[in-house]
């Protein structure tokens, strides 16, 4: 997703920059006295970009305002999607593993996440687990969510996660540390009747 987002960022910023440079440059050039071609959107320094006739041309058409509102709504939604995508924390694509030769090797971040998830889900009392890596590839950090079964003891689940799954992941990836933020949730279940 980060590659797609990077491409979208470049395209959006490139198009926005091109529109601003061409539009602003043309308005500035005409304002400074350059004679525009006959097909240009304004004729000279005293001309306005949108005339009264242009503003009122579609006023009586029934489809015009709903179309304008729909287009502006789509633009706002796309802008909000783009903003949320910028603010969302990115997943770590790869982890640098010390291979002993001084250069290191790259381990896919999703592979390490999958190992952590399978290790956490094998622990007693853990129903489901989710792990995301973030940070730098030489100093990764993990964010884990454990959904605990009704009989699970949260402290014991955390101890087992730290001693088993996280230790095994650190050792196998050659990491000195793997700081992890763990969120615990309880699996939803029906209340049991006591007789």
Image (cartoon, rainbow, N blue to C red):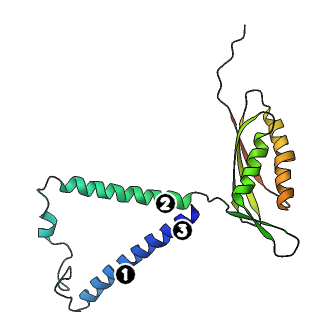
Residue 97 falls in image quadrant: bottom right
For the residues bearing labels 2 and 3, Cβ distance under 8 angstroms? no
Residue 159 in percent (x, y) is at: 85, 41
Name the quadrant of the C terminus.
Answer: top right
Specify few, some or many for label 2: CA neighbours under 10 Å numbering under 14, 14-19, or 20 or more.
few
Q: CA distance from mark 1 to mark 2?
A: 23 Å
Residue 160 falls in image quadrant: top right
Could you tell which of marks 1 and 3 lies nearer the N-terminus? Answer: 3
* Rendered image: mark on residue 21: 1
Name the residue that disc number 2 marks.
Answer: 83
Residue 39 in percent (x, y) is at: 18, 83
In the structure shown, which secondary structural element does the residue marked by tag 2 occupy? helix
Residue 14 in percent (x, y) is at: 44, 76
Q: What residue is rendered at 75% in x and 61% in y?
A: 140
* Rendered image: mark on residue 140: none
In the structure shown, which secondary structural element does the residue marked by tag 1 occupy? helix
Which residue is at the front of the view, 171 or 52? 171
Could you tell which of marks 2 and 3 lies nearer the N-terminus? Answer: 3
Q: What residue is rendered at 73% in x and 30% in y?
A: 149
Residue 57 in percent (x, y) is at: 12, 64
Specify few, some or many for label 3: CA neighbours under 10 Å numbering under 14, 14-19, or 20 or more.
few
For the residues bearing labels 1 and 3, Cβ distance under 8 angstroms? no
In the structure shown, which secondary structural element does the residue marked by tag 3 occupy? helix
Name the quadrant of the N terminus.
Answer: bottom right
Q: CA distance from mark 1 to mark 3?
A: 22 Å
Could you tell which of marks 1 and 2 lies nearer the N-terminus? Answer: 1
With 90 as the anchor, is 59 left or right in this view? Answer: left
Name the residue that disc number 3 marks.
Answer: 6
């Amino acid at each position: 997703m980060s590659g797609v987002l990077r491409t979208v960022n470049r395209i959006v910023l490139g198009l926005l920059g091109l529109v601003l440079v061409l539009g602003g440059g043309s308005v500035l050039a005409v304002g400074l006295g350059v004679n525009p071609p006959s097909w240009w959107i304004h004729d000279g320094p005293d001309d306005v970009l949108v005339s009264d006739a242009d503003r009122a041309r579609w006023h009586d058409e029934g489809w015009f305002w709903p179309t304008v509102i729909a287009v502006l709504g789509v633009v706002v939604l796309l802008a909000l999607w783009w903003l949320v995508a910028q603010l969302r924390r990115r997943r770590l694509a790869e982890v640098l593993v010390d291979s002993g030769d001084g250069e290191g090797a790259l381990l896919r971040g999703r592979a390490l996440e999958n190992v952590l998830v399978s290790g956490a889900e094998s622990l007693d009392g853990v129903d489901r687990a989710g792990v995301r890596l973030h940070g730098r590839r030489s100093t990764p950090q993990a964010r884990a969510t454990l959904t605990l079964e009704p009989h699970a003891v949260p402290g014991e689940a955390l101890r087992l996660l730290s001693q088993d799954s996280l230790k095994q992941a650190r050792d196998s990836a050659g990491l000195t540390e793997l700081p992890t933020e763990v969120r615990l949730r309880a699996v939803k279940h029906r209340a049991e009747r006591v007789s």
